[in-house]
Amino acid sequence: MTRIFVPKDAAALALGADRVARALADAAARLGHVIEIVRTGSRGAVWLEPLVEVETAAGRVAYGPVAPRDVAGLLEAGLLDGGAHALRLGNPDGIPWLARQQRLTFARCGVVDPLSLADYRANGGLAGLEKAIALAPADMVEAVKASGLRGRGGAGFPTGIKWNTVRTASADRKYVVCNADEGDSGTFADRILIEGDPFTLIEGMAIAGLAVGATKGFIYLRSEYPHAFATLNEAIRVAEQAGILGDDVMGSGKTFRLEARLGAGAYICGEETALLESLEGKRGVVRAKPPIPALQGLFGRPTLVNNVLSFAAVPWILAHGAKAYADYGMGRSRGTMPVQLAGNVARGGLVELAFGVTLRQIVEDFGGGTRSSRPIRAVQVGGPLGAYFPATMLDLPLDYEALAAAKGMLGHGGIVVFDDTVDMAAQARFAFDFCAVESCGKCTPCRIGAVRGRETMDRVIAGESPAAHLALVEDLCELMTDGSLCAMGGLTPLPVLSAIRHFPEDFGRGGSLPAAAE
Amino acid sequence: MQRPEPWNAARASEIIAGLSGLEGATLPILHALQDAFGHVPDAAVPLVADALALSRAEVHGCLTFYHDFRRAPAGRHVVKICRAEACQSVGGEQAAADLLSRLGIDWHGTTADGALTVEPVYCLGLCACGPAALVDGVPVGRADADAVLATIEEHAP
């Protein structure tokens, strides 16, 4: 019997993976081949999806991107023995796009059956939790501190310091909450991990629970990810049955339970205090800080809130040592960052690399330029609240501080590529529009500012006194930056101002408008 | 796509009772009601409020805050189309405009025959294979109007 691996990651499904799996099963049955189709997650090479792999005597052989109509020809060419074909990519680990990455967090994604604990263990899973159980909580926290890990959700706060705050807080109960409300456009690393290797997140959260003294954890997952939700719930069930979660976490005598909760389409719930309100069953309205969630979070209890990628980095750190993790990276950005390369790009997907790589290396070397084959004009880094950079700034390194110095941010690591047909005034307008749609409404700068910003941009676009109206937009941006309660209103100015600064020719200032229009 | 059940207060109470023990049960309950009935009618609000010892205003506030919850039935098929930046960069807005004009509806609209509702969504996490859509829960990548309509055909009951 031959094992064939076909991803069931949502992006692979979006490109026809289910149809390919059905075609393989049908054709094999017709030809009398005995095959077992294993549904994996994705390795993250979305441009090669559906990426089909076959287990042969010489190891796995990959083919992609496979369409259902290719299946008959592939079987004829000896797919089951790794036979030659135009779509043959050879050993998947040798595909240059994957081989040039530094996969720590995503090492298992696309390789294993996401719900097989045997696969997970065979590929290094649970080594981190086993090591953690032998340590005192303070030493677990110390390992996370020493690794230099910073919050991968966007803010970049040192993870170990947050863990220590929760660990030393005293309360009748504490919570661990995973922010899986991955709402930024251009990001999908949380989704790929949860669909492809959910036990890594579960293991990371269990370590966190033991470290900070919490017995209950929640994973707040966005409702736009129904496939991830199904996989996650099943993985939690499997982990409970195996004693990884429950009253005696892997024989440690400690309790830790997990529950996955579905969001309901509100972008603001990716903001940690709005997320906590939502988990409590309320409107996702931002809370003023202080008190910080680490001291008064969910139901008023000390709560550790981390992003999926932060928790998912922890098992590797515990298993291999803090120093091994900190050896990757540059400056104060240690370890690896799972970058998500998206939008108008020829070879998009998940690229995990040590910090310090330049945007150009990612967008050009990995991305291969635009999908439309037109010149790159702009990249937006860090989601809808991140800055637009022109093609001339692609030598910026991927590093929290370097991007902040360039008046941008790394955010959750999404990079969206635009070709030269993009209208940057429309993108600036969209930033306000998005803020108007998604603002929780609690603070005035965000609630009203977004609407006024959109209106003012409409006037700029219509050519009504663009210079005067742009001055108003810049003034409004200053107010939103300084006066908003959270990053929604506070960072919406980043895409707006970066678009105005780097692409003035799109805002009626470049002399393209007749003087009368002024 | 599974047909929603007609509204039934006893059935709703049963669903609510099954979940009201959860910590912060409001969202799980509203999701479960919408899964069953296709929307959350106003008649559900006092039932949820009573079960969770909340005011009707609090439940109403929650119901109306989140984009996902519908207070009126949708069409038999629901198409969610991404309008965020990554999909914009590959012509998503044009593809969506084509679909809407072929259907003769606007965003959030339902076709006159009640067959189809189109809703905007800001990111489906399919950003490296946009424009992206979710058709009755089935993801569609590199989507255009034809691909969306073909997916409905393929998965039609």
Image: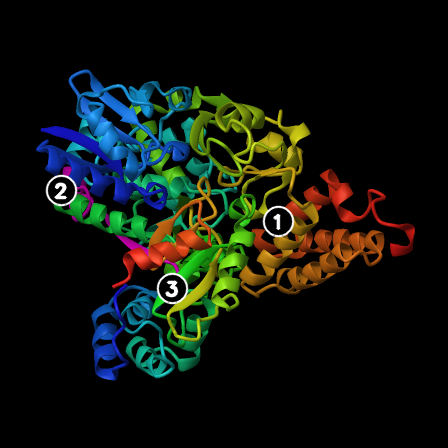
Q: Is residue B92 left or right of residue B25?
A: right
Q: Residue at x 70, y 46 (%)?
A: A497
Q: Residue furthest top?
A: A58
Q: Quadrant of residue A277?
A: bottom left
Q: Which residue is mark 1?
A: A491
Q: Residue at x 52, y 57 (%)?
A: B98
Q: Which residue is mark 2?
A: A242
- Depth-wise, is mark 3 or mark 2 nearer the camera? 3
What kind of element bears circle 3?
A: strand
Q: Which mark is residue B78?
A: 3
Q: Position of residue B81 (x, y in %)?
A: 46, 56
State whether discs 3 and 1 lie on one chain: no
The amino acid type of the residue labelled 1 equals: Leu
The amino acid type of the residue labelled 3 equals: Val
Counting residues from the start of the chain, the first of labels 1 and 2 encountered is 2
User: Mark 3 and mark 1: span between their CA atoms?
Assistant: 32 Å
Q: Position of residue B108 (x, y in %)?
A: 48, 68
Q: Residue at x 21, y 82 (%)?
A: B10
Q: Quadrant of residue A19?
A: top left
Q: Residues within 10 Å of mark 3 (few under 14, many from 20)?
A: many
Total numbered badges shown on the rendered structure? 3
**Which chain does the numbered disc 2 sit on?**
A
Pick the residue in front: A505 or A338.
Answer: A505
The amino acid type of the residue labelled 2 equals: Ala
Tell me whether circle 3 and circle 2 mark residues in contact (CB < 8 Å).
no
User: Mark 3 and mark 2: span between their CA atoms?
Assistant: 38 Å
- The range drawn in magenta is A244-264
